[in-house]
Structures are given as C-alpha cells and as structure tokens.
Amino acid sequence: MNALNSLIDGFGTALTPINLLWAAVGVLLGTAIGVLPGIGPAMAVALLLPVTYGLDPTGAFIMFAGIYYGAMFGGSTTSILLNTPGETAAVVAAIEGHPMAKSGRGAQALAAAAIGHFAGGLIGTILLVALAPTVADLAVGIGAPDYFAIMVLAFIAVTSVLGSSRIRGLASLLIGLTIGLVGLDQMTGQQRLTFGTLQLADGIDVVIVAVGLFAIGEALWIAAHLRRTTGDAIPVGRPWLGRSELRRSWKPWLRGPVIGFPFGAIPAGGAEIPTFLSYVTEKRLSRHKNEFGKGAVEGVAGPESAASASAAGTLVSMLTLGLPTTAVAAVMLAAFQQYGIQPGPLLFEREPDLVWGLIASLFVGMVLLLALNLPLAPVWAKLLRIPRPYLYAGILFFAAVGAYAVGGEAFDLVILLVIGLIGFGMRRYGLPVLPAVIGVILGPAAEQQLRRALQISDGSVTGLVNTPFSVTVYVIVALLLAWPLLKKLLPGRRTETADSGQPEE
Amino acid sequence: MRLRTPSALLGAAVLVLAGPPLITSGSGADTGTQIPGLRLMVPNSPGGGYDITARTAAKDAEDAGLTHNIEVFNLPGAGGTVGLTRLVGEHGNGKLAMSMGLGVVGAARSNHSPKTLADTTPIARLTEEPDVVVVAEDSPYKDIKQLIEAWKEKPGKVPAGGGSSPGGPDHMATMLTARAADIKPKDVNYIPYDGGGELLASILGNKVAFGVSGVGEYLDQIKSGELRLLAVTGPERVKGLDAPTLQESGYDVHFTNWRGIVAPPGLSDAQRTKLTGLVRKLRDSPEWQESMAKNRWDDAFLTGDRFGDFLAEEDGRVVSVLKELGL
C-alpha cells in the first residue's frame, strides 16, 4: 500500500502546529464565507492569494482547501435558517431545511447538514486517495454527448420537484430557463435578451437569481402578510438530532458521496447537479414521501453529503490532471502556478510532501469543521428568535451585500430587486421557486453541451448517442419515464407504497 | 445572544472583505515614482489572467519601493468591455490604470462596444505568451503538416477546440492559422471552451481533433507526453520544447497573447510620463523579473505611441477576422 504510507507521511506534514493553524484559519474563513451569500469560495481564495505569497506552498494550500470545504459547510446554514442560499450548491438545502427551521427543527436540520458534509467530505476524500488515478482517466473519456445525457436526466428528475401542480412547476422552470438565456451566446458571440446593456452581457449570476427569488421574494411576501399574521418569532425547539431522525439520515449520508464524488471529478460536473439528483433519489427512496416539501430530514442529509463529496472529486481532476472542474479549482490552479508548481500528471512524483500533506489536511479539516459546526447548530438556530421584522430586515441587508459582492456593481442590486419582485409574484400565484433556480443553472449548461456535441459531430444527430455512457443514461431516462406505465401493467406487487409517492394536493 | 451572532457575521464580513488590502499594505522609500492613491482596475474576475498580472505588478511595485499601496479592484463583465467603458469614462484621471490584453481587444469588438482601446491612453505592453497547437498522445496526427492537410480536406470533420469564445485569443490564433492554410474561417469548426483547463479534457479524450491554447496551460502535459505539441504560434520556438513554429512549417502566422496596461483618455503629458515611468521602473525591477520567471511570462515591453500603434494593428486584425466570420 504505497498510497497508505504516503498518506501517513502526509499526516506528519498536516499535523505540525503551524499547518494545523492554517487548516483552522481556512475552515473558519471558509465557514464565514459560505454563510455570506455572494462571496463564493473562488473569490475568497483569489482575494487571499496575495496574502499567502509569504507562506510556504503547503501551508497556503492547506488553508485554501480548508476554505473550500468550510464554504461547503457554511453555505447550507443560511439556506436552512433564512431561505437564502449562500452559494449555488446550497440551494437544495433550502427546500427541506427551511421548512424544518420554520417548524422549530432548525438545529436538527443544521446538524443533519453538518454531519452530511462530514460524511460526504470524509468518504469523498477516502475515494480521492483510493481512486485518484483511475477516476482521472475515466473523467477524460466523458464528452459533450455524455454531459447532455446527464442534463436530460436532471431535467426529467426536476419534474419530481415541481411541487403539487405540474403546470405551475413548468411555468416556474420556464421563467428560470428564460433568465438563463440572458447574456452573450458563448458559441457565436450573439447577444440575447441583453437590451444592449453591457452589464447583462455575462448573463445574470445564479447567486443573484437564487438570493432574489428566495430571500427578497420571501421577505417581500412576509412583509405583505405580516399585518395579518402574528409577528412572533419562530420557535427554536430542541437542539439535537433524535433517534428517528438519525435512523432516517444515515443512509442518505452514505448515498450522497456515491452521487457527488463522480460529478466533482468530471469537467463541467460541479456541485449543483449532484445535489438535485441526490434530493430526487432520497425522495424516491424515502418511506416518508409525504413529508417532502414540508421538512424531510433526508432531503437535507443526502444533498449536503453529495455537495461535500463533489468538492473532494474536484480535487482529483485538479491534482492528477491539472484540470479545474469548478471555479475554485481554477483559482487554486492559478495559485499553484504562482508557486511555480504545475499540477498535473507529474505532481504526485514531484511534490509528494505537498500533495499528501494537502490530502491529510482535508481529513483534519473535516474533523475541525464538524467540531465547529455541530455545537454551533443550536447557536445559529437561535437567530430565528429575532422578531420577524428585524430578521427579514437583516436578510434583506445580507442579500444586498451578497449580490453586490458578486460583481461589485450597483446594477446587480437593481437586477436583484427585479428578480425579488418576480419571486414575490411567483409566491402570489403559487409558483414554486426552486424549478426556476434549477432552470437558470441547468438551462445554459444543457444548451452549451448540446451544441458542442452537435458541433463535434459536424451536425449529425447520431453524435448525441455515439458513446456507451450516453446510451446508458438515455436507457435510464426511458425507464424512469416508462415506470408509471410498467407499474400499471405489472399488478399485484405492493401498490400501496407507490400510491403514497403521489404528490398530494 | 441576539446581538452576538449578527455581530460575529459582520465581523467575519469585515475580515473577509477588508483583510487582504489591510495586510498587503506595505511601505517603500520615495524614489520619485510615487503616485499616491493609484488604482489598478482588473476587467475580469479574481484569479483570471489579468487579475494575476495586476496583483503581481502591484505587489512588486510596492516591494521595489516604487509606490505605496496600489489598490487593485475587479470590475468584471462582457470579457473586459464593462471595465473598458468605465476606464474611458474617467477622462483625465491620472490615478487609474487598467490591466488588459488581447482578450479585451477582441471582447470590445465582439460585444460591439461603442468604446474601444483607441479611446484609451496606451501605457505599456508587459508580457506575451505564444499559443500552442496540441493533440492527444494517441491522436493520428504526428506533425503539423499532416494535421493541416487533413483539416484542409474536411474542415467540418476536424473540430478545433480553444479556450476562449469567438473574438478571444485562442479563437484568433485558430482562425489566423486557418487563414494561413487557405481554409476559410467560416468553414472552421471551432468549439469554444471555458478556458484551457476545460479544453484539456476534450483534447485528452480525443473529443476535438486538436486544441489551441496558451503554452503555459499545458507545459506539464507536454513534458509528460500526454499531449503532443505540433507547433507554436509565436515567431520563435519555445525554449525547452521540441516543436517548430507555424512560420517555419510554411504557414504565415505570427500570434502571441499579450498583456499590458492602459490608462483613461485625456491625460496630461506629465500624468502620462509619470505613469509610464512607474511601469518602466517596475519592469526593470528584480522583483518583476523574478515574477516573470516564476510565472513563465515572456518579456514584451513596449511603451507609449509604439504600444498605441501595436494596439491599433491588433484591433485591425481582430476586426478583419470577425468580419470574415460575419460576427
């Protein structure tokens, strides 16, 4: 076991007091950054880059990895408590987490998320150690047709989170797809829906859309109704996970990494799609389907675990191929180059101390993060004790700060408000908000992969199904679509569980 | 408790936002190059190429004692066009400069921006880097001639990948190569990727027939043999790499991706001289020389009107390619 020995050496590097300090600074900063909407881990690492020039590279990268993992932990906190996702991977945490918080189970949701991140990060990092070279080779084999197939699968999966009314869900999805169209077409340079405004040429940042629809929309809605309801604070409830919640959460915690890790490792995978897929999987597998949408703990545990595991997957491609699959990885890659280190096929041979120290520090960071976040969960949950008028004023403030931080442009605040008004209107007419956010994330990605696949095959439609991977995914999609029909044709086998899966009106 | 948590949040926000500028503030002796309150705009997001150039330049200038506290800030949008528009709007402001490069020239044109680099005061070109033409280890193309012959025969079936969108550097390099090989730019099947990193996966997996991107992106993959380097686009071979230039292979291409600094229009001669003097001293400093070596940037120092003429030439080249493509 060569890798195991190297890893033990790595712990030797990671556990020196100074490197432990950098790991602690990293996870603290990362948690703070994740909590604030708008300032993603990528921007944080980029801004801190000049500060770390004086450090040795190992210390700097241990800190950066701490920021990355810490931001994943922190992102779900505001999602759950305030319905304001700190970053895109945490959008799903709001669906089940926020209803849990509203019904006084905020601390449990936070704990489920924290343990989920811990499990995901831990399993993901173990997979990183065990599978790095193999996964990296497979990641390269995945091309545009395969991505498009995954996107189709994700779109099909989305229909199950459309809410009680399919029509309203689809309307919301279309709103999202339309917002996603805004900006310069990457393939031809054509402007779409920009109305000649340069500020719209890059499209509207997903964080602004998510914060606008969720937080601003919610705050306006509450403000419009506060007079009729009570202005009382939300109950906080008891702080720890109960036995039944643990029983419901442990399987999602373990399933999350299986979905999240591969997505992190492939280029253009990212953390968003696996969180959606994990959510849908948990919803299908759960025995408490009727609780979904109202605060099912599985819907927090699974996606959060997937999000952290995808962060570990990202490091696989970056370290072994020099291939950045997310914005954070791209910035870290630039940081490596600043130190004169080129991540890539030769990194493990050239800089074993750095690489294995970094990997070992990931384990250390996970433990630090769990130790930091579990006791903090009840503390954070007490935020909800603030009377609602003040609480929502605070949410509006942080939402505005976050939107401004994305690009440093006052224009973004105008967009935020407009999207907030759309969010308000959607609530008024009973449109669910989540499909819109998914549309903004998936729409442009799906379009790009489809066009890229067709371009590579020089316009031939067979280019979409010419890989075994894409064919497999389409078969799964076909089975998913045909499943309700098949179930009717095969009578007599446990139809009662199937019935409880129908969304109730 | 009610107070503590929000204040902790606020504290974290202050730490994150204000930390780096506070820590990087250094001091230096007065050498006559001081421009108090100088701000350097980066027209793309933190971590990008112009950002690294700007932050490195600011730090080296401070370390070399040329000036105090250059504030680097990001104003991303539309490939640099948003920043360019802002810069042109700061008429006569001698305390502002912008880190930029070939990408901004292209973005201003492909975005049909009313403001172009002709509206700015050129200060200096700093660095350059050639693009490379690479294929996967197991690609059928063994040398550049073979690749271009196949490309000429069926341009549509030989997809080319680049790390930038139309109008960007890799797109320009690909189109100029096509033009030199008598392939109509309109026939080229160019597939844009979001940077050299994303492109790498598609080259290694043979999804595109060949890739065109900056040499710095792929040095390690070339050395380990995972990528085969067929040609470089610059006027000279790259030291340590065994590949011909396109020119010596018979294709008249001279392309490098350069970076430099421009200032707002309407500067007085004194302001312009002062800014150019600072950049010249920076370029001659051992700190900057070391940073260039570390980042593998090639020196391409060119100042004043000669840089202005160069900008106009590059702009003309971008316009001619985009026109042929009907963009």
Image (cartoon, rainbow, N blue to C red):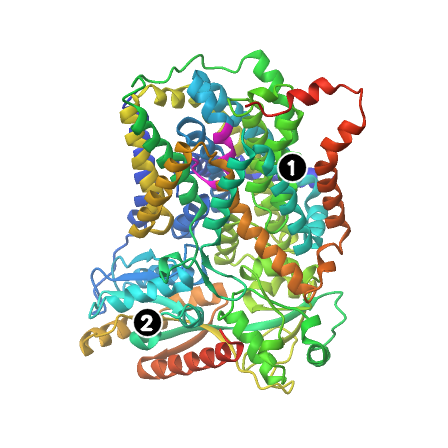
Q: Position of residue A438 (x, y in %)?
A: 52, 41
Task: Provide the residue span drawn in magenta.
Answer: A84-95
A484 vs A313, nearest the viewer = A484
Q: Is residue A319 above or below residue B196?
A: above
Q: Is residue B61 above or below residue A238?
A: below
Q: Contact (CB < 8 A) between labels 2 and 1?
A: no
Instruction: Give the residue at x 48% y 81%.
Output: B320
Residue A88 in magenta stretch: yes
Q: What's under tag 1, amino acid-wise?
A: Ile
- Name the subunit of mark 1: A
Q: Position of residue B123 (x, y in %)?
A: 31, 75
Residue B219 in magenta stretch: no
- How crowded pointer 2 is (Cα within 10 Å; few <14, some 14-19, many 20+) is rated as some
B187 vs A118, nearest the viewer = B187
Circles 2 and 1 on the same subunit = no
Where residue A103 sits, quadrant-wise, is top left
- Name the subunit of mark 2: B
Whole-number angstrom distance, CA of label 2 to CA of label 1:
47 Å
A253 vs A373, nearest the viewer = A253
| Dot label at residue B213 | none
| Dot label at residue A259 | 1
Secondary structure under tag 2 reads: loop
- How crowded pointer 1 is (Cα within 10 Å; few <14, some 14-19, many 20+) is rated as many
Where residue A11 sits, quadrant-wise, is top right
Disc 2 target residue: B115
Q: Is residue A112 left or right of residue A456?
A: left
Q: Is residue A381 something that shows in the picture?
A: yes
Q: Quadrant of the C terminus of chain A?
A: top right
A176 vs B254, nearest the viewer = A176
Instruction: Give the residue at x 50% y 71%.
Output: B169
Q: Is residue A69 something that shows in the picture?
A: no
